[in-house]
Amino acid sequence: MKSSAKNIRLTSVDELFSTEESREDAQREKVVEIALSQLHPFQNHPFQVRNDQAMQETADSIREYGVLVPAIARPDPSGGYELIAGHRRHRASQLAGKETMPVIIRELDDDAATIIMVDSNLQRETLLPSERAFAYKMKLEAMKRQAGRPQKENMSQVGTQKRSDQLLAEQVGQSRNQVQRYIRLTELISELLELVDERKIALNPAYELSFLKKEEQTKLLDAMESEQTTPSLSQAQRLKKFSQEGHLSLDVMRAILSEEKKSEVDRVTLTSDTLRKYFPKSYTPQRMQDTIIKLLEQWQRRQKEQER
């Protein structure tokens, strides 16, 4: 009978004398100092890292106090680490003249990393429409993939029997329709999307324009340049209709854009990003609207009382 001694694994000295507490401690996440040069941006990161006044203020704070909140990164198979959360802190550390920054290293698959990356950035006070559009799209795609392969951490989501886009809408405090309208903006060519970010094209017309073919969108830029105007909502809807019917040419675009726009009632538009900083995070858009109306009614009553 052959000996099975070769299959016996001997316990090492370190394992014999290690305690359960020390073994658990070895598995805990730790904050480590990582060289800035070893930290790479997340692939297709949708959020811009702008060298604006806020960035300079962050750099000044880091120069004086250091990075107070560690970044999150995961090992990069090609070397170094891929940043998941902390891109602005990374840039501010560079501007502050730092060589390292505190980082939590975490093993994450692509979908989990995407969701954390998006969630950590959606908390910013100001987000461009393009940033929100691509962030929603990336997170929704990751949520759909997770829902398609149930795991322990995903069971609660699957058990709800809700659509992924409905779950996403609830998490970001917007309607499912509004989330889908933002995601639709990712179909715009970069030049048109930049005009949306610059508020030269409003969200609703931009949504309609996103249904134009890419080559039609490029021609639209020429028409807008020649007519020195941007489409209104009604004009964008007509452009979309002509496109769907296969009759949208450059001449048609110019004819529509050259028409005198219908006069619209003066109105003030406040975006959810502007309003949200004045309300608790738990407030839905509808609740914010109801609260604003009540405050305006109270103000109107006081005005009338003062006029008496």
Image (tube, rainbow, N blue to C red):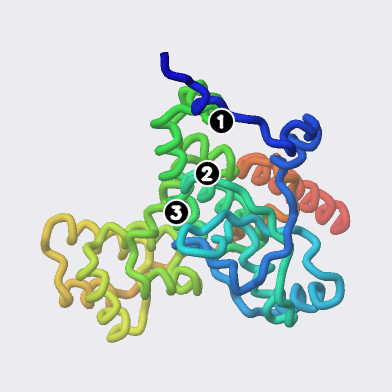
Q: CA distance from mark 3 to mark 1?
A: 28 Å
Pair 2/3: label in front: 2
Say whether marks 2 and 3 touch (CB < 8 Å).
Answer: no
Percent x, y of residue 89: 69, 68
Residue furthest out toward the top: 1
The structure residue drawn at horizontal position 55% and vertical position 69%, both measured from the top left corner, is 48
Disc 1 target residue: 153
Neighbourhood count class around disc 1 (C-alpha, 10 Å): few under 14, some 14–19, many 20 upward: few
Neighbourhood count class around disc 3 (C-alpha, 10 Å): few under 14, some 14–19, many 20 upward: many
Residue furthest out toward the front: 1
Check disc 1 and give the amino acid type.
Answer: Glu
Disc 2 target residue: 112
Say whether marks 2 and 1 touch (CB < 8 Å).
Answer: yes
The structure residue drawn at horizontal position 58% and vertical position 40%, both measured from the top left corner, is 171
Check disc 3 and give the amino acid type.
Answer: Tyr
The structure residue drawn at horizontal position 24% and vertical position 66%, both measured from the top left corner, is 214
Disc 3 target residue: 182
Quick one: label 2 or label 3, which is nearer the N terminus? Answer: 2
Q: Is residue 213 visible?
A: yes
> For residue 236, what is the image quadrant?
bottom left
Q: CA distance from mark 2 to mark 1?
A: 10 Å
What is the secondary structure assignment of the residue under circle 3? helix
Quick one: label 2 or label 1, which is nearer the N terminus? Answer: 2
